[in-house]
Image (spheres, rainbow, N blue to C red):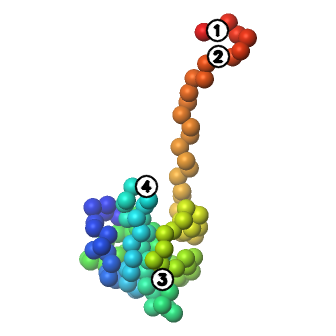
Amino acid sequence: MQTDVDPRKLIGRKAFDRNGNKIGTVGEVYLDDATGVPEWAAIRTGLFSRDAFVPLEPSELVEGALRVPFDRALIKDAPDFGVGRHLSPEQELQLYHHYGLDVAPPPPPPDRDCGHLAGSDET
């Protein structure tokens, strides 16, 4: 998704699945803790006032609406963590797995020269 979009401007926009079926309306936008980039949107589905979290990265704004590249059924079956609260790393991981998105592994530790082995004459 465009990273220059003000997350406040997403709130209230209609959201559609990849087939053009209406999912609901964007109610909240969640930012990445480390970068401040919009990462998740909570879509009010209207079904028992439930909110479904959708990832913003593969989604896009099309003609003023949020187009989410997943089927409506998958979106409505997303884990429900309630809105208005911080998403924990574990909850985000559950959402990534639900949508079949790869989560980048943590970077490897830096390669450091820790000196030489004891008893060796190398310096």
Q: Residues within 10 Å of mark 2 (few under 14, many from 20)?
A: few
Kind of residue indicated by mark 4 = Ala
Residue designated by label 2: 116
Q: Residue furthest top?
A: 121
Kind of residue indicated by mark 3 = Asp
- Do tag 1 and tag 2 residues touch (Cβ < 8 Å)? yes
Measured Cα–Cα span from mark 2 to mark 4: 37 Å
Q: Residues within 10 Å of mark 1 (few under 14, many from 20)?
A: few
Disc 3 vs disc 2: which is toward the camera? 2
Residue 104: x and y in percent read 53, 52
Residue 27: x and y in percent read 39, 81
Give the structural element (helix, strand or loop) at label 2.
Answer: loop
Upstream in the sequence, badge 4 or badge 3? Answer: 4
48 or 72, which lies in front? 48
Residue designated by label 4: 34
Give the structural element (helix, strand or loop) at label 1.
Answer: loop
Give the structural element (helix, strand or loop) at label 4.
Answer: loop
Find residue 65 and report its image quarter: bottom left
Measured Cα–Cα span from mark 1 to mark 4: 42 Å
Q: Residue at x 54, y 56 (%)?
A: 103
Residue 6: x and y in percent read 28, 67
Upstream in the sequence, badge 3 or badge 2? Answer: 3
Upstream in the sequence, badge 3 or badge 1? Answer: 3
- Do tag 4 and tag 3 residues touch (Cβ < 8 Å)? no
Residue designated by label 1: 122
State the mark number for residue 29: none
Q: Residue at x 41, y 85 (%)?
A: 24
Q: Is residue 21 visible?
A: no
Residue 94: x and y in percent read 59, 67
Q: Is residue 9 visible?
A: yes
Residue designated by label 3: 51
